[in-house]
């Protein structure tokens, strides 16, 4: 039969293995939740950008590629995140002057400008 210290050592080792497995499973679950949150955020961002592109394209009479260029240029020119500007376009929270700039209209000159 086993001696008491050897049996205790095996039980301790078995508990250590079980604890390690539990920690690894917890880490995997945590990583999966984090990835899910990141993917959800990316999808929401993409949706806002696509909606903003559509609004810009419709209002300014340009194609979707040009609408994206304007949106991106406007965000870069103001050192703001593309998603933040897209969400502002969709929510219609930009000031009239900002909208004219984004759409490529310069009301003062009555012409279109490159944004």
Image (cartoon, rainbow, N blue to C red):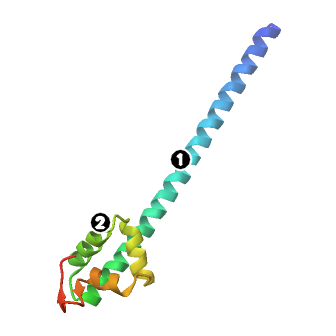
**In the image: residue 96, left or right of residue 113:** right
- Residue extending furthest front? 108
What's the residue at 41%, 70% (across, down)? 84
Report the disc number at residue 69: none
Q: Earlier in the sequence, mark 2 or mark 1?
A: 1
Quarter location, residue 23: top right
Horizontal and vertical percent for residue 1? 80, 8
19 vs 47, left or right, is right
Q: Report helix, strand or loop for mark 1.
A: helix
Q: Which residue is mark 2?
A: 76
Q: Nearer the viewer, residue 92 or 50?
A: 92
Mark 2 or mark 1: which is in front? Answer: 2
- Tell me the distance, in whole angstroms, between the alpha carbons under discs 2 and 1: 32 Å
Density class for disc 2 (Cα within 10 Å; few <14, some 14-19, many ≥20) is: few
> Under tag 2, what secondary structure?
helix
Q: Which quadrant does the C terminus fall into?
A: bottom left
* 67 left or right, relative to 44: left
Q: Observer-nearest residue: 101 or 67?
A: 101
Label 1 belongs to which residue?
31
Nearest the camera: 81 or 37?
81
Q: Position of residue 10 (x, y in %)?
A: 72, 17
Residue drawn at (82%, 10%) of the image: 4
Image coords of residue 61 (percent x, y): 22, 89
Q: Residue at x 31, y 78 (%)?
A: 53
Label 1 CA crowd tier, 10 Å (few <14, some 14–19, many 20+): few
Q: Relative to 110, say whether 101 is above or below.
A: above
Q: Residue at x 18, y 90 (%)?
A: 109
User: Percent x, y for residue 103?
Assistant: 27, 83
């Amino acid at each position: 039969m086993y001696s008491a210290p050897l049996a205790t050592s095996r039980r301790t080792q078995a508990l250590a293995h079980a604890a390690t497995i539990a920690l690894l499973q917890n880490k995997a679950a945590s990583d999966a939740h984090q990835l899910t949150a990141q993917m959800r955020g990316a999808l929401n961002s993409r949706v806002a950008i696509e909606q903003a592109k559509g609004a810009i394209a419709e209002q300014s009479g340009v194609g979707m590629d040009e609408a994206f260029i304007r949106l991106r240029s406007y965000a870069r020119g103001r050192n703001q995140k593309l998603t933040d500007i897209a969400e502002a376009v969709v929510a219609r929270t930009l000031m009239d002057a900002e909208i004219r700039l984004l759409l490529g209209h310069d009301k003062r000159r009555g012409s279109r400008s490159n944004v």
